[in-house]
Image: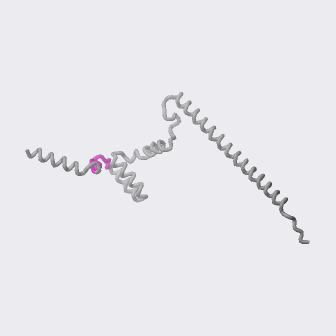
Amino acid sequence: MSSSIGSTVDQTERRSRGHCCGNWGRRGNWSALNIAAMVVGFMIFWPIGLLILYWIIKGRSVKELPQGIREQWSKMTGSWHGNGNGPSDNVVFNEFQQTQYDRIREIKDEIKERTRRFAEFRANAKRRADEEEFSRFMAEAPVRNDG
């Protein structure tokens, strides 16, 4: 009977803590290097310290942090920076992908050129409109001779 009471107390305690405080501290990778990096991170700039603390709590080593940041940055920007092979080991796919990137770059260059030409066209049109307006003003305005 006492064992059932003890298990009930354990279950009640787990439920009262909820998901928030689960096993976070137990899962963490609390090595001397990680703790030192976290302290230095807080001393430099507190968000860096929080990032390192989160990294440690997730059970990862600080040595893995730079690669993790690079991977997340690549995911967010949609780019990849590898060793030249690209994201795949398939050479044909990588060539196809590079061809597509080159095509996109050409389209972007064409859009920039058209934008430049259109801006030039608008500037010329504005100048012609200003000249026409000035000519009309000069034709309508009486010439005054103060002499």
Residue at 28% x, 51% y: name it: 21
In the image shown, does 143 or 80 lie closer to the viewer? Answer: 143
Q: Main secondary structure of the magenta part?
A: loop
User: Please, is residue 41 above or below residue 11 in the view?
Assistant: below
- Viewer-nearest residue: 39 or 33: 39
Q: Is residue 38 magenta?
A: no
Measuring from the top left, give residue 101's x and y in whole percent: 57, 36
Which residues, given as a range, are shown in magenta?
A: 21-30
- Tell me the quadrant of the picture where the C terminus can be found: bottom right
Q: What residue is rendered at 8% in x and 44% in y? A: 1
User: For residue 136, what is the image quadrant?
Assistant: bottom right
- For image coordinates 31% across by 48% down, the residue present is 28
Instruction: Residue 15: give x, y in percent of width and height.
Output: 22, 48
138 sits to left or right of 55: right
At 38% from the left edge and 48% from the top edge, which residue is drawn?
Answer: 62
* Image x and y of residue 55, in percent: 37, 48
